[in-house]
């Protein structure tokens, strides 16, 4: 069986499909994050405060976290091909409305619509990859699709910000609208037309949220991401005040951080392909050590930068494994809820970001930047503990039978 798995390879159609789904996440990531670099322009043009403009970021995240699983429950019963094309079309319309917005109310409305549509598209993309790709390639392909978001931060967001600064912020959203149109054209020709439809009832799908195994798995990425964002939320003052780096070099370092985080997705694919759930127990321990190391390296510019770049490499290392794990759990406990389960990883990540930012704020208010390191490390250790518990429960229950052997080797 092992030999057969090793010989599996992607067909040309599967490679093009993987590229199309990755391009889609790149476009959605650019649309989501580019607003961060344009808040000053937006607040000035719409005559709103910078704090109010900031709700365009937080509002997107909240709508994404709440709306994605709810809408996924109700649309997953429809055939995937026309559903994907409809959602991409709505994404294009949402970005076009953003580009045409002359009031805050219309802009926040378009951002909420775009957020929910993006979340459902990510969930369906992961589900399609899981259905279409060979077993041994699922982990790397899912990691690649997630990488679209990372690449958007490194390439799409700076490019979109530059377009907005040279022209106006509306022009940036015309840019993301154009990217959406390109994605739609590719999807029309590339997406498989006959995809499996999981026709689970809304009650059956939502019942997953009451399943202790799903809840346990859900909080693994939540605490892992919270560990990183406890520190990352305050990375600019850490660089300037902690490591003594001049303000003019901060953007360059953040770009390097984004580049290093791309390697995190490569690492995620390798972990998911080789006994992923088992490996995560130790991956989070490594993450905790790296986060905690900043406590000792804060006084050195070079050593501190090494800690931060290593933090970037670990940030998404669990994504592909957790995504596959949640979908496998759904296959076991509620087969009709696979699409719903595929929507939970991004939700867990968004909650983790909010938790990390909150923890970081409390630490900074009551201590100092140096203490963010061990608090972040502790959060990663909690993720490791949850992964240990999940792994032991899998082994005890002989989780998923042959599916476990193929995907997770428990």
Image (cartoon, rainbow, N blue to C red):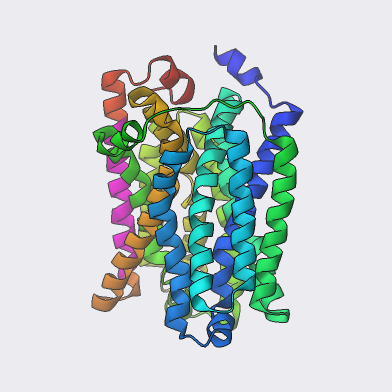
| Nearest to the observer: residue 298 or residue 327 | 327
| Nearest to the observer: residue 379 or residue 208 | 208
Q: Position of residue 101 (x, y in %)?
A: 59, 74
Whether residue 230 is situated above or below residue 315 in the rendered picture: below
Q: Is residue 196 visible?
A: yes
- From the image, which quarter does the N terminus lie in? top right
- Residue pushed farthest top? 1
Q: Position of residue 144 (x, y in %)?
A: 60, 42
Q: Position of residue 308 (x, y in %)?
A: 48, 63
Whether residue 264 is situated above or below residue 232 in the rendered picture: above
* Residue 408 sits inside the magenta stretch: no
Whether residue 382 is situated above or below residue 44 in the rendered picture: above
| Nearest to the observer: residue 114 or residue 305 | 114
Magenta region: which residues? Answer: 371-390
* Residue at 65% in and 68% down: 173
| Nearest to the observer: residue 78 or residue 367 | 78
Q: Which corner quadrant of the image does residue 250 belong to?
A: bottom right
- Residue 167 in the figure: left or right of residue 80: right
Q: Which corner quadrant of the image does residue 156 belong to?
A: bottom right
Q: Is residue 301 visible?
A: no
- From the image, which quarter does the C terminus lie in? top left
Whether residue 197 is situated above or below residue 202 in the rendered picture: above
* Residue 389 sits inside the magenta stretch: yes
Q: Position of residue 335 (x, y in %)?
A: 40, 24
The secondary structure making up most of the magenta span is: helix
For the image, the number of numbered tags is 0
* Residue at 26% in and 34% down: 211
- Residue 231 in the figure: left or right of residue 83: left
* Residue at 43% in and 79% down: 52
- Residue 148 in the figure: left or right of residue 306: right
- Residue 52 in the figure: left or right of residue 90: left
């Amino acid at each position: 069986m092992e030999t057969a798995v090793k010989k599996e390879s992607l067909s040309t159609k599967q490679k093009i499909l993987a590229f199309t789904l990755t391009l889609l996440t790149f476009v959605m990531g650019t649309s989501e994050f580019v607003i961060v670099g344009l808040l000053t322009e937006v607040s000035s043009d719409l005559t709103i405060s910078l704090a109010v403009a900031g709700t365009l970021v937080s509002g997107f995240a909240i709508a994404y976290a709440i709306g994605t699983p709810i809408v996924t429950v109700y649309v997953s019963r429809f055939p995937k091909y026309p559903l994907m094309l409809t959602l991409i079309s709505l994404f294009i319309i949402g970005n076009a409305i953003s580009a045409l917005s002359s009031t805050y109310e219309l802009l926040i409305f378009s951002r909420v619509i775009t957020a929910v549509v993006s979340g459902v598209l990510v969930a369906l993309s992961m589900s399609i990859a899981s259905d279409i790709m060979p077993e041994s390639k699922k982990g790397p392909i899912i990691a690649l699709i997630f990488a679209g978001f990372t690449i958007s931060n490194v390439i799409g967001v700076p490019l979109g910000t530059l377009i907005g600064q040279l022209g106006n912020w509306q022009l940036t959203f015309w840019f993301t609208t154009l990217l959406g149109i390109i994605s739609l054209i590719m999807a029309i020709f590339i997406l498989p037309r006959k995809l499996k439809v999981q026709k689970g009832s809304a009650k059956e799908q939502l019942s997953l949220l009451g399943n202790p195994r799903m809840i346990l798995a859900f909080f693994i990425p939540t605490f892992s991401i919270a560990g990183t964002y406890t520190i990352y939320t305050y990375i600019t003052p850490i660089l300037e005040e902690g490591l003594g780096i001049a303000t003019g070099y901060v953007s360059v370092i953040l770009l390097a951080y984004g580049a290093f985080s791309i390697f995190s997705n490569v690492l995620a694919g390798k972990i998911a392909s080789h006994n992923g759930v088992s490996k995560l127990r130790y991956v989070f321990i490594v993450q905790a050590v790296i986060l905690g190391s900043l406590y000792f390296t804060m006084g050195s510019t070079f050593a501190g930068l090494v800690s931060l770049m290593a933090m970037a490499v670990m940030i998404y290392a669990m994504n592909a494994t957790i995504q596959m794990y949640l979908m496998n759990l759904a296959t076991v406990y509620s087969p009709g809820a696979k699409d719903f389960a595929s929507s939970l990883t991004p939700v867990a990540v968004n909650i983790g970001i909010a938790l990390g930012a909150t923890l970081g704020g409390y630490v900074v208010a009551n201590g100092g930047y140096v203490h963010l390191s061990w608090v972040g490390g502790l959060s990663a250790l909690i993720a490791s503990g949850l992964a240990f518990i999940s792994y032991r429960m899998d082994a005890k229950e002989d989780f998923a039978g042959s599916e476990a052997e193929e995907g997770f080797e428990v």
